[in-house]
């Protein structure tokens, strides 16, 4: 929540049931890893533009091994500072100090602003997935677990430094998060119309670009913010 907070502002307290979820996210968000992810995503936008070969990224993994991009199909060519593994399914960021890429990344939009925390891998690394790439997604299972994960998704989108332009709308049991800044509330009946209008407008605007990721990597540095509508 600190991302958009003016220095003199006082935030309203989070509902009791959500404070622990926010604390878990802040443990990641306040660490160095969040800055690495944000800077790497912005640098990737420049790297894709410099090569003219858009890459599709579905997830990011960060931990003691460094930062890796996970792709939906192999791309062995990599990109500047992003080295593909032998399969081409993963790109590893080759950077020992953020100052090496910070200057280039500063003026770029993040390549995947829809990243949210999926969970922790067996090796302790954090896996973030791009909900924009997933599209319409149903999360099923224990009601409490599902609600906690969707709450985490909403908090990620509302507070992550790479998601500053994402259009976040909340529906149903998550409306108590409306206390967060730059969050809109929707009635359940409004969701289909809002989603259809957004999809249609995006499709018209993309033109020759095959995806919003490709459009962000094109000339113009447009952020192409996605619409995210968590509903519990």
Image (cartoon, rainbow, N blue to C red):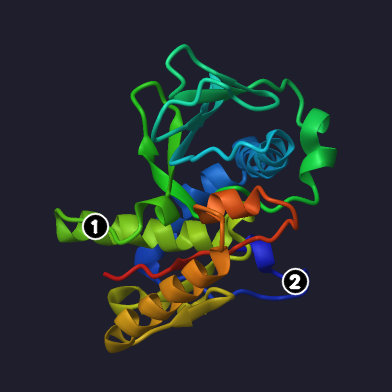
The quadrant of the image that shows the C terminus is bottom left
Which residue occupies the foreground of this view, 198 or 7?
198
User: Residue, x 60% and y 63% (percent of image)?
Assistant: 224
Image location of residue 213, percent across then percent down: 55, 50
Sort mark 2 into few (<14), some (14-19) or many (20+) by Cα contacts within 10 Å. Answer: few
User: Residue, x 33% and y 81% (percent of image)?
Assistant: 191
User: Residue, x 39% and y 70% (percent of image)?
Assistant: 229
User: Residue, x 64% and y 27% (percent of image)?
Assistant: 79
Sort mark 1 into few (<14), some (14-19) or many (20+) by Cα contacts within 10 Å. Answer: some
Looking at the rendered structure, the secondary structure element under dot 1 is: helix
- Which residue lies under the disc numbered 1? 146
Image location of residue 181, percent across then percent down: 58, 75
- Which residue lies under the disc numbered 2? 6
Residue 52 falls in image quadrant: top right
User: From what the image shows, is residue 73 above or below residue 150?
Assistant: above
Q: In this view, does 15 lie to the left or right of 100?
A: left
The quadrant of the image that shows the N terminus is bottom right
Residue 43 falls in image quadrant: top right
Which residue occupies the foreground of this view, 67 or 8?
67
| Circle nearer the viewer, 1 or 2 | 1
Which residue occupies the foreground of this view, 141 or 7?
141
Q: Residue furthest right?
A: 103
* Residue 94 marker: none
* Contact? badges 1 and 2 (CB < 8 Å): no
Residue 169 falls in image quadrant: bottom left
Q: Is residue 161 left or right of residue 147?
A: right
| Real-space CA distance between mark 1 and mark 2, rounded to the nearest whole angstrom | 32 Å
Looking at the rendered structure, the secondary structure element under dot 2 is: loop
Q: Is residue 92 visible?
A: yes
């Amino acid at each position: 929540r600190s991302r958009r907070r003016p220095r003199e502002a006082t935030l309203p307290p989070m509902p009791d049931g959500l404070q622990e979820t926010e604390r878990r996210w802040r443990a990641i968000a306040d660490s160095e890893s969040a800055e690495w992810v944000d800077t790497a995503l912005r640098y990737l936008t420049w790297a894709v533009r410099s090569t003219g070969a858009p890459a599709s990224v579905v997830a990011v993994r960060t931990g003691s091994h460094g930062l890796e991009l996970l792709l939906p199909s192999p791309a062995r060519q990599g990109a500047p500072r992003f080295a593909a593994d032998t399969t081409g399914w993963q790109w590893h960021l080759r950077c020992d100090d953020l100052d090496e890429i910070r200057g280039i990344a500063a003026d770029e939009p993040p390549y995947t602003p829809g990243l949210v925390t999926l969970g922790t891998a067996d090796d302790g690394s954090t896996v973030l997935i791009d909900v924009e790439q997933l599209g319409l997604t149903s999360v099923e299972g224990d009601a409490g677990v599902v609600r906690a994960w969707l709450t985490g998704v909403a908090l990620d989108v509302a507070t992550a430094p790479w998601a500053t332009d994402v259009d976040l709308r909340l529906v149903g049991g998550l409306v108590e998060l409306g206390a967060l800044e730059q969050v809109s509330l929707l009635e359940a009946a409004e969701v289909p119309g809002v989603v259809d209008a957004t999809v249609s407008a995006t499709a018209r605007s993309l033109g020759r670009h095959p995806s919003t990721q490709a459009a962000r990597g094109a000339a113009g540095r447009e952020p192409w913010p996605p619409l995210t509508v968590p509903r519990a």
